[in-house]
Amino acid sequence: MSQKITVILGSPRRDGNSERLAAAFTRGASEAGYKTKNIRMHGLRITGCIDCRRCWNNGSHCFLNDDMKEVYESLDGADVIVFASPLYFYSWTSQIKQAWDRLLPYFHKNSKVDVRGRRAVLLSTAGDNDESCFDGLKRSFELACAYCGWEIVGEICAYDVYESGAINKKADWLKRAEELGRNL
Ligand SMILES: Cc1cc2nc3c(=O)[nH]c(=O)nc-3n(C[C@H](O)[C@H](O)[C@H](O)COP(=O)(O)O)c2cc1C
C-alpha cells in the first residue's frame, strides 16, 4: 500500500509561493509512489488550543468541535507530515500555528494514536533576501519535531520571494522541492 503524505498549507494566498513549493514537492512525491493530501488551513473553521485539558474525554482527539477533525483524520494515517508556511514576522502564519497547537492530543497520556516516528518536512518562503530570516522558524520546527519524535527529512526555505509567484523566477527552489519529494 502507498505511503501517505499530509501537506498542511499555511498561507492565506492561494497558489502563492509556499503553495507552489508544496506543489513541486508533491509532484515529486507522487512520482515516487506516495499518496498525498493537501489541507489548506486558511478558510477552515479552526480555533487555537484552549488548554481545557479534555483531550480524548469525548472519545475523539479534541473537545472542540471544529474543522480540525479533518486535519486529525489525515494526520492519524500520515507517514510524512509537511508544513508549508510563508514566513510571517519570522515565524509561522497564525493559520498553521493553530494546527501545531491543536496537535496536543497526540501527546496526551490517553492518546489513542501514536504519531512518534513519523517523518516531517518544512517548506517555507520569505521576502527577505537573507537566509537567516528563517533562523527562528527552523529552530521552532526542529524543537517541535524533537518533542513529537519526528524525523526531519527535509527543510527548504526559499528567500527573496515576496510577490506571489516570484518563486518561479528564483534560483532552483521548485526543482529542489520536487527532488526532495522524489527522494523521500
Ligand atoms: C503579515 C506578513 C508578515 C510577513 N513577515 C515576513 C517576515 O517576517 N520576513 C520575511 O522575509 N517576509 C515576510 N513576509 C513576506 C512573505 O513571507 C512572502 O511574501 C512569502 O513569499 C509569502 O508566501 P505565500 O505566497 O505562500 O503567501 C510577510 C508577509 C505578510 C503578509
Image: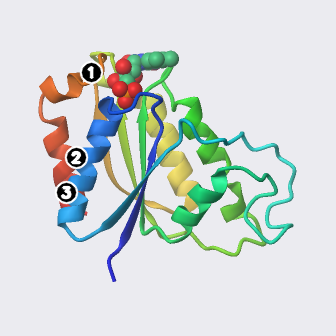
Residue kind at label 2, given as amino acid type: Ala
Does the CB distance between marks 2 and 1 fall below 8 Å?
Answer: no
Q: Is residue 129 visible?
A: yes
The residue that disc 2 covers is: 24
User: Is the CB of mark 1 within 8 Å of ligand 1?
Assistant: yes
The residue that disc 3 covers is: 28
Does the CB distance between marks 1 and 3 fall below 8 Å?
Answer: no
Residue 59 is left or right of residue 135, and the answer is: right
Q: Quadrant of residue 153?
A: bottom left
Q: Quadrant of residue 173?
A: top left
The kind of secondary structure element at disc 1 is loop
Q: Residue furthest bottom?
A: 1
Q: Residues within 10 Å of mark 1 (few under 14, many from 20)?
A: many
Q: Quadrant of residue 180?
A: bottom left
Asked if 91 appears above or below 142 in the picture, the reply is above
Label 2 to label 3, Cα distance in Å? Answer: 6 Å
Name the one closer to the observer, 80 or 15: 15
The image position of residue 25, as x and y in percent, is 25, 50
Taking the spot 83% from the left edge, 46% from the top edge, the residue there is: 51
Which numbered disc flags the more N-terminal residue, 1 or 3?
3
Residue 172 is left or right of residue 63, and the answer is: left
Asked if 25 appears above or below 161 in the picture, the reply is below
Which numbered disc flags the more N-terminal residue, 2 or 1?
2
Name the one closer to the observer, 130 or 94: 94
Residue kind at label 1, given as amino acid type: Val
Residue 110 is left or right of residue 40, and the answer is: right
Circle on res. 161: 1
Label 1 to label 3, Cα distance in Å? Answer: 22 Å
Does the CB distance between marks 2 and 3 fall below 8 Å?
Answer: yes
Label 2 to label 1, Cα distance in Å? Answer: 16 Å
Q: Is residue 183 visible?
A: no
The kind of secondary structure element at disc 3 is helix
